[in-house]
Amino acid sequence: MAENEEEQPAGGGLVKKLAIYGGGGLLMVGIGLAAGWLIFGNAQPDPSEEIEEIIERKMQEREAADEMEADNGTPSKLSKATPEEEVFETIYHEFAGTFTTNLAGSRKMLQLGIGVSTQYDDTVMMNVDAHQLALRSIILGVISDFSEDQVRGGEGRELLADALRDAINAKLEELENFGGVEDVHFTSFVLQ
């Protein structure tokens, strides 16, 4: 009998230990699951719902501000109708290279890069391109008629641009029965 008593505590102790450790482990797992559910189990709000709420709140604030403005007797802003204007596209053409010539009554030379523009159709620029050789000759002749003093300053450049425009249009009218160049632009302007 003594032998049975000694074996029982050893066997009974093992079951007790397993029960304590197993029960403690299950208890820890249960606590972890409960804590996880409390922290992460609650449903997070949908971001799109938050955005809708913000929009609605802003609209209500704007309506309230409009009502307060109306109550104060301050007129609200009204948009005026803008008249529809027909806008024409400006077409540009730049002559290749530069034009270099002596100025009248001077030893100085003027070197120009020249472009032209129009708001007519592409036909004008096709005519300019087709008659480039004749137009280059006309441009060089007009530039050489100006003196050094005439091309100095902004007014001098405007006078030169107007003279070039008129000469180009006259040549195009002679060749194609229509000028159409509205402006002459200087892409480079070197007086040396």
Image (tube, helix red, strand yellow):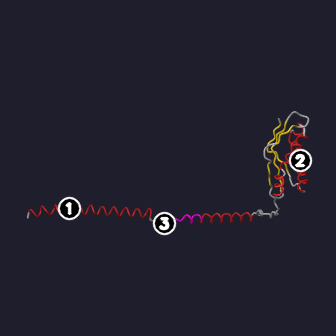
Give the crowd class for mark 2: few <14, some 14-19, many >=20 residues within 10 Å.
some
Above or below for 180 versus 1: above
Image coords of residue 79 (percent x, y):
78, 63
Q: Amino acid at mark 3?
A: Ala
Give the crowd class for mark 1: few <14, some 14-19, many >=20 residues within 10 Å.
few
How far is disc 3 from disc 1 in space, using C-alphas?
Answer: 44 Å
Q: Residue at x 73, y 63 (%)?
A: 69
Between 151 and 32, the residue placed more toward the observer is: 151
**Screen quadrant of the N terminus:** bottom left
Q: Amino acid at mark 1?
A: Leu
Mark 2 or 3, which is nearer the eye? 2
Q: Is residue 25 magenta?
A: no
Check residue 162 in the rendering and tell me which mark sits there, or answer none: 2
Secondary structure mostly taken by the magenta-highlighted segment of the chain: helix
Earlier sequence position, callout 2 versus callout 1: 1
The residues colored magenta run: 45-51
Earlier sequence position, callout 3 versus callout 1: 1
Image coords of residue 174 (percent x, y):
91, 53
Image coords of residue 132 (percent x, y):
83, 49
Q: Which residue is mark 1?
A: 14
**Which SS class for mark 3?**
loop
